Image: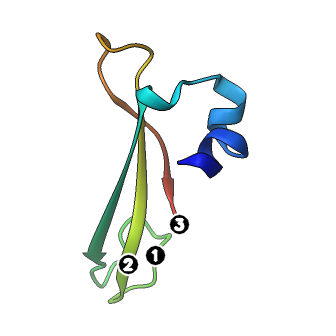
């Protein structure tokens, strides 16, 4: 999270740490390669989903993803 806030999009959008969640997921990619950007028939691990919100009362939204 510190890297997101210091070097990533968080450094540009001024989001506060309490309004950021980072989820990690592992998944298998099918023979099509997903949307074409993944290696077909492979596995991805520690894929990051960065969720942000503007305040405690706002909904979470995906701001970034990847390794």
Which is more N-terminal, label 1 or label 3? 1
**View extreme (bottom): residue:** 41
Q: Is residue 65 left or right of residue 43?
A: right
Q: Position of residue 55 (x, y in %)?
A: 40, 13
Q: Position of residue 4 (x, y in %)?
A: 60, 46
Report the Cα–Cα distance between label 3 and label 1.
12 Å
| Foreground of the two, 45 or 7 | 7
Callout 1 environment at 10 Å: few (<14), some (14 to 19), or many (20+)?
some
* Residue at mark 2: 44
Pointers 1 and 2 in contact (CB under 8 A)? yes
Does dot 2 land on a helix, a strand or a loop? strand
Callout 2 environment at 10 Å: few (<14), some (14 to 19), or many (20+)?
some
The quadrant where residue 56 appears: top left
Callout 3 environment at 10 Å: few (<14), some (14 to 19), or many (20+)?
few
Report the Cα–Cα distance between label 2 and label 3.
9 Å
Nearer the observer: mark 3 or 1; the answer is: 3
Q: Is residue 45 above or below residue 60?
A: below
The quadrant where residue 18 appears: top left
Q: Is residue 59 left or right of residue 62?
A: left
Numbered label tally:
3
| Numbered mark located on residue 67 in the image | 3
* Residue at mark 1: 38
Does dot 1 land on a helix, a strand or a loop? loop
The quadrant where residue 58 appears: top left
């Amino acid at each position: 999270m510190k890297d997101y806030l210091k070097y990533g999009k968080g450094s540009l959008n001024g989001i506060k740490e309490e309004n950021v969640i980072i989820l990690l997921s592992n998944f298998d990619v099918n023979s099509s390669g997903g949307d074409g950007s993944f290696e077909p028939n492979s596995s991805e691990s520690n894929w990051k989903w960065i969720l942000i919100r503007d305040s405690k009362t706002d909904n979470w939204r995906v701001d970034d993803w990847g390794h």
